Amino acid sequence: MFRFNNVYFKDILKNINLSIENNEMIGITGESGSGKSTFLKLFNKFNIPSKGNIYYDDKNILNIKSNILRKEVIMMPEAPYIYGKTINDFLYTSLSYNSKENVSKDKKYELLNLTNLNKNLNDSTSTLSSGEAKKIGFSLNDAFKTKVSTFR
């Protein structure tokens, strides 16, 4: 699925050689500032290697359009940014980005129910705690049916 060949990024990451197969889960540990987030940003071209190659399904990621790659490889931030005035606005915008079809109210309720939050679609996004925002982010990650998920 992913193959890193002699990948460098600035002076932070050096000589990364790694293969990650389908359904494989890896963990990356290290001290603050050691390059963990920088490394994750290589997966979906938020960072471009200064040297070396990254392959996704045997294609060099530099030859894959960023918007196409990012629909298959999603990065879940440590603290998801929940935008929009209401949870409904946020879910509609987020789901519409990844779908050609109209997003039904039932689909949004289904996602909200997955989170086990006692929230209504019309509730303000400003009422969400960081933990609730993460739960909504995880439910969206599931709805997008992405091939690869990275978590910070």
Image (tube, rainbow, N blue to C red):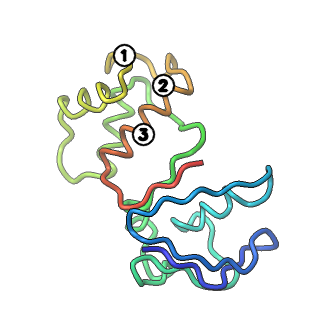
Which residue corresponds to mark 2? Answer: 132
Residue at x 45% of width, y 55% of height: 149
Residue 92 found in image quarter: top left
Q: Position of residue 57 (x, y in %)?
A: 39, 78
Quarter of the picture holding the N terminus: bottom left
Marks 3 and 2, how far apart in space?
10 Å
Residue 2 picture location, percent across and down: 48, 74
Q: Nearer the N terminus, badge 2 or badge 1?
A: 1
Q: Earlier in the sequence, mark 3 or mark 2?
A: 2
- Decide: few, some or many residues near mark 2? Use Cα within 10 Å; few <14, some 14-19, many ≥20: some
Question: x, y percentage for residue 40?
Answer: 60, 60
Could you tell me if the residues under marks 3 and 1 are in contact, i.e. CB atoms within 8 Å? no
* Type of the residue with mark 3: Phe
In the picture of the structure, the residue carrying the numbered disc 3 is: 138
Please tell me whether mark 2 sits on a helix, a strand or a loop. helix
Q: Which mark is residue 119?
A: 1
Q: CA distance from mark 3 to mark 1?
A: 16 Å
Estimate the spatial distance between the alpha carbons at disc 2 and disc 1, rounded to whole Å.
10 Å
Label 3, secondary structure: give it: helix
Q: Is residue 29 above or below residue 124?
A: below
Q: Residue at x 56, y 45 (%)?
A: 77
